Image (cartoon, rainbow, N blue to C red):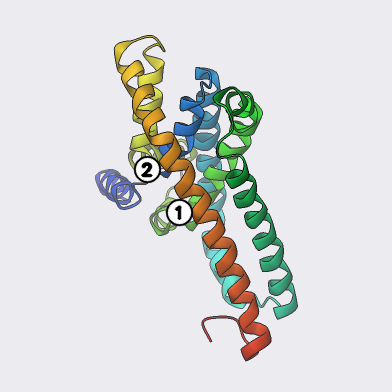
Amino acid sequence: MNPLAVVGSVIGLGVAGLDPVGALMVIPAIAAGARRRVVMAFFLTSAVVTVATGLILGESVQLLTRWLADLTIPDPVRLLAQLVAAAALGWWAVHRFNHRNDPEDDKKKSALGGAVGMTLLGAFWGVSAVTDPSFLALAAIDSQIDSVLASVAVYVGWFVVSQAPLCVVVLTLAAGRNSAPVQRAIAFARRLAKPTDAILTALLALAALLLVLNAATLAVAGAFWPI
């Protein structure tokens, strides 16, 4: 494949997959006083896992496509999985709502579990790239590339472009926590912290509700939504 075409595709797909959610994930941690290494743990883990996920997907994209086309999951298994996911999301939403007014010191102690929690969250965020159509299109391009180093460069490029807001946050923190840009970023993050927390809690509750409603359609109509 023409290198220039690959570069253009990476940039185009990165712009198509531009996502501020990664940056919004670290804003509450920054506002709670998380150290720079905690934010870096999230950033590096999400980048590495994204690249690793892409490499695995690129090598097996055709096999995976055929497997998904032939895959049939029994309704009872789908029902159980949806109810478990709904319960987990609902519990998380209720927990966040009940602790919404906790003192900043308590939030700082948790800080999403510190470096370990942010690392796990970064790994989850990296794997979640498979839900992005632009990432799947990138994997299809990667399946035509023979060089592993070139494949890594492709996914790193896509990550940098699609996660530009997160990269900007990390670069700002790298300048030094006491620098003027960082202090402005922290002040901005603190202003956004409460609205972001409220939006995330609402989205968790909505996701749990939709999963329950989807599961309920099986009992009412005999099939999952959409029927």
Q: Badge 1 local density, few (<14 within 10 Å), some, or many (20+)? A: many
Q: Is residue 150 visible?
A: no
Name the image quarter holding residue 72. bottom right
Q: Position of residue 194 (x, y in %)?
A: 45, 38
Q: Judge left or right: residue 75 versus residue 30.
A: right
Secondary structure under tag 2 reads loop
Q: Position of residue 146 (x, y in %)?
A: 46, 46
Which residue in the protein does label 2 denote? 20
Nearest the viewer among 38 and 163 is 38
Q: Judge left or right: residue 22 versus residue 11.
A: right
Nearest the viewer among 117 and 107 is 107
Q: How many marks?
A: 2
- For residue 35, above or below residue 149: above
- Which-is-in-front pick, marks 1 and 2? 2
User: Looking at the image, which residue is at 46% across and 35% down?
Assistant: 149
Q: Badge 2 local density, few (<14 within 10 Å), some, or many (20+)? A: few
Circle 1: residue type: Ala
Identify the mark at residue 130; answer none if there is no mark.
none
User: Looking at the image, which residue is at 36% across and 23% down?
Assistant: 187
User: Looking at the image, which residue is at 59% across and 29% down?
Assistant: 107
Circle 2: residue type: Pro
Which residue in the protein does label 1 denote? 139
Q: Position of residue 79 (x, y in %)?
A: 70, 74
For marks 1 and 2, the one nearer the N-term is: 2
Secondary structure under tag 1 reads helix
The CA span between labels 1 and 2 is 21 Å
Nearest the viewer among 164 and 111 is 111
Q: Position of residue 102 (x, y in %)?
A: 59, 32
Name the image quarter holding residue 170. top left
